Amino acid sequence: MRRRAALLSFLLPLPAWAGDCPLDLGQGTTGLVVFSSHYMITFRPDPLQIEVGAPFALVMNVCTRRGEAAELVRVEATMPEHKHGMNYSPTVVPVGNGRFRVEGMVFHMPGSWELGFDVRSGEEIERLTHDIVLK
Amino acid sequence: MRRAALLAALLVAAAPVAGQAPLDWTPDEIRAVASHGPWPPPVAVDRSNRVSGNPAAILLGQHLFEEPRLSASRQVACGDCHQAGRDWRDGRARGFGLVELDRRTPSLWNVGWQHWFGWDGASDSLWMQSIRPILDPREMGGSTRGVAKLLREDRQLACGYERAFGTAPGADDERLLVDAGKALAAFQQTLVTPRTSFDDFRDALVAGDTIAASRYPIQAQRGLKLFIGANCASCHFGSLFTNGEFGDTGVPFFARDGEVDSGRLGGIARLRASPFNRLGQHSDDATDASATRTRHVERQHRNFGEFRVPGLRQVGRTGPYMHDGSLATLDDVAQHYSEVSPDRLHSDGVPLVRALGLSGEERVDLVSFLRSLDSDTPKLLPPAPLCP
């Protein structure tokens, strides 16, 4: 269980954000940012260092670009190279104001993982993705 | 002349494998080698087992491990299949208790660091896995009542129980069965293999100590390079050489004529149906954090015919190989990975296991590396009496 995702190097200070949907992850001011033309997501793994085979959670904020809280419908992770996903299905727990905690993630192999976030703030679901290389 | 001879002798002493330098290792390769250590890892603690690490429970567990009265016939003990002097296995292709089983008896070395147990991972804790063979009619055929009665009525065992758990054996039979499993688990958590020549090489390579690194045979170094290059560590990951999960390596999954062993698929079903999993009342983890895997594990089609990735420490001494013992030697395993059929391994993406087409020499190298994960293990002394 030695290999770790090189996450720290990607951690960005989060923009100060006024509005109903604070992108502060509720703790500290660092996280990863993923965005599209409609949405802005920040997240941080808990524990911060993802290890092969070890369960982790994601602490997340999901907002629209206008600063309103949006809904996180589902989180998935796959290894695009091998075309398989995780052996576990995570659950999304909303904790208010666009904040979520995703429990039950396990990356069981080293290599490239693609995180998929299904989010919505109306009818349509949009998928945002983020790549993590676990060494 | 004499001085020259002395000098030569000294040089040989300093570099025992005279004339043999380690192979060149790239930074990526060194990182890959480093990921298989350090050894040993921190002591395994199971929060769902309140006597994990407790010396009195370890002692009780060692006694119970050799206790045939846990079985219906009063003749089969854990230690008959997991034999202390034979690396905690029986050397047979398939286990044999009251009848022949469909799977091989795995070695129990380093089992305390696993999180799924059995070839299908039907148990999510070492104590749950330790209950299973007691009740399985093919293995020991025992009963909850029988185990509880034994713990209550045998003076030595009752006394050992009280020292381990702090109270005399109570009236709740199921609780006593589970506690027997927990003592057995505490004992099995102490089964740790010593350091190996691979570990010395790994540490030397990480430290940049070429002299120490050069003591590791060239053949094993070449085999290790093959192991890294073939991405064996996608599954045989980390210091245990297993990611603790499940995979399909193209081993046939017929248990016997016309019957298939569905592997992980059936394992998840059995896990969920059991009252002894970590989500049940018998877990001692009040925070429930250690039940995350059990709560979230997902049953998927591809689990059919998947088996748990075995750790590779002590592998040279724990054959035959695979869940059904179908490969007799490590060379057979190397040949299997060399020739495995792509049709059998239906994979849409880049396959994790593919025919490597190894030459005879490469197979020897690979096996030489695998054997460098073996170590001479100290002989386990018979346990002290429970209550002298």
Image: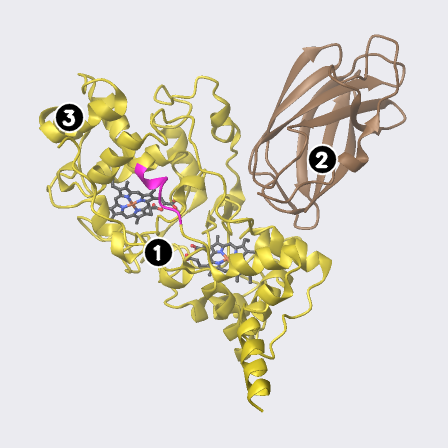
Circle nearer the viewer, 2 or 1: 1
Specify whether disc 3 shares its chain with disc 2: no
Residue A1 found in image quarter: top right
Q: Which residue is mark 2?
A: A115
Q: Which residue is mark 1?
A: B377
Q: Is residue A48 left or right of residue A70?
A: left
Magenta-highlighted residues = B187-192
What is the crowding at mark 2: few (fewer than 14 residues within 10 Å), some, or many (at least 20)? some
Front residue (pair B277, B102): B277
Labels in figure, total: 3
In the structure shown, which secondary structural element does the residue marked by tag 3 occupy?
helix
Q: Residue at x 18, y 20 (%)?
A: B169
Residue B157 visible in this rendered orientation of the protein: yes
Q: Which residue is mark 3?
A: B158
What is the CA distance from the residue labelled 3 to the residue labelled 2? 53 Å
The chain under label 2 reads A
Dominant secondary structure (helix, strand or loop) of the stretch shown in magenta: loop
The yellow one among the chains is B
The brown one among the chains is A
